[in-house]
Amino acid sequence: MIKSKWLLIGLIGMIGIALCGCVNQTSNASEKPTQSTTPQTSKVENKVLKIFHAGSLSVPFSEYEKMFEKEHPNIDVQREPAGSVMCVRKITDLGKKADILASADYSLIPQMMMPNYADWYIMIARNELVLAYTDKSKYNDEINSENWYEILNKPGVKFGFSNPNDDPCGYRSQMVMQLAEIYYKNPEIYDNLVLKNSNIKVEKENDTYTILVPKDINVNTNKIVLRSKETDLLAPLEAGAYDYLFIYKSVANQHNLKYVELPKEINLGYYEYADTYKKVRLELLSKNKTLVAKPIVYGLTIPKNAPNKKEAIEFVKLILEHPEVFENNGQPVINPVIGFGNIPEEIKPLVKIE
């Protein structure tokens, strides 16, 4: 009897020890997730830096993106190339947010974004328009800077330009063709190439021409190829779908295209001819905006509602500290870079403020 009692007591003790072991194991197991999650709280937060930029900036901005992400591995730079007017409208009309806005026409920033959506901008680089073509283009062995408009007017020849409502390259193409009438002293150049093949109109008052661009542009597709932005026109040109394209010289070089260099008096690339350029204006009827032809200068800003202003400033600093990226891609930088408005303190030393 006594022996059975002691056996019972021993069994109860063994069960107690086993239970304690289970409790300790459960306790230790519950502590592990806490220990494993502790290092995660110390990690640097990943961010997305959103950039809206002109299509003609795609190549240099791709290089800047790689440089920036190498220095900031926690930041994913996401670029949205489009026509510059469309880039601005994403912010002003559609309510989208971007950390950086870079336009192929700096004047869009003060005209369309300030003061509600931006309070500063910088002028960073320049460009000029050329007439690009390939070995598949009709009369490519004949065209030059003196007869290009005659070649474009030949039967069976098709040429392209981007939509003036969406893209500065598009409205600059119209300005170049209208300026050609003045330079070559031929009042029928723009009429033959555009007015007879679209619903675009022109008004003349004294020595000033105003091109009237409707909201919905209709073109003779047997003569004109129209797309939203100039980079959308590259693939069909290279494929031989049409013959000639008005495009930035930098883009033509980047894509190894042949091109006709247009006279300085009409190609919008030179400050010394600013007074000549301004004889042509273009009115976007849907926006009630009048644009004066001027030398091609790229502009950049950080919108007021940018989600990541600190990182955006770092990206802008990278651009300003590495002008060779623009230079190597055929877009001469403005030296010094010119700034207007409430320039961020971090980039003031790199900018000439006017």
Image: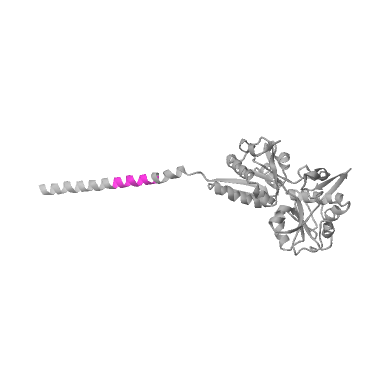
Q: Is residue 302 magenta?
A: no
**Is 50 in front, or is 312?**
312
From this view, report whether residue 1 is shown above or below residue 305: below
**Is 327 in front, or is 97?**
327
Which quadrant does the C terminus fall into?
top right
| Residue drawn at the location 60% of the way across and 40% of the way down | 309
Q: Is residue 29 magenta?
A: yes
Q: Please provide percent x and percent y for residue 329.
A: 68, 52
Q: Main secondary structure of the magenta part?
A: helix
**Is 345 in front, or is 101?**
345
**Is 54 in front, or is 125?**
125
| Residue drawn at the location 88% of the way across and 53% of the way down | 188
Residue stretch rendered in magenta on the structure: 22-33
Residue 252 seen anywhere in this rendered image of the structure: yes
| Residue drawn at the location 82% of the way across and 47% of the way down | 211
Q: Please provide percent x and percent y for residue 87.
A: 68, 46
Q: Please provide percent x and percent y for residue 57.
A: 67, 50
Q: Quadrant of residue 223?
A: bottom right
Q: Please provide percent x and percent y for residue 47.
A: 55, 45
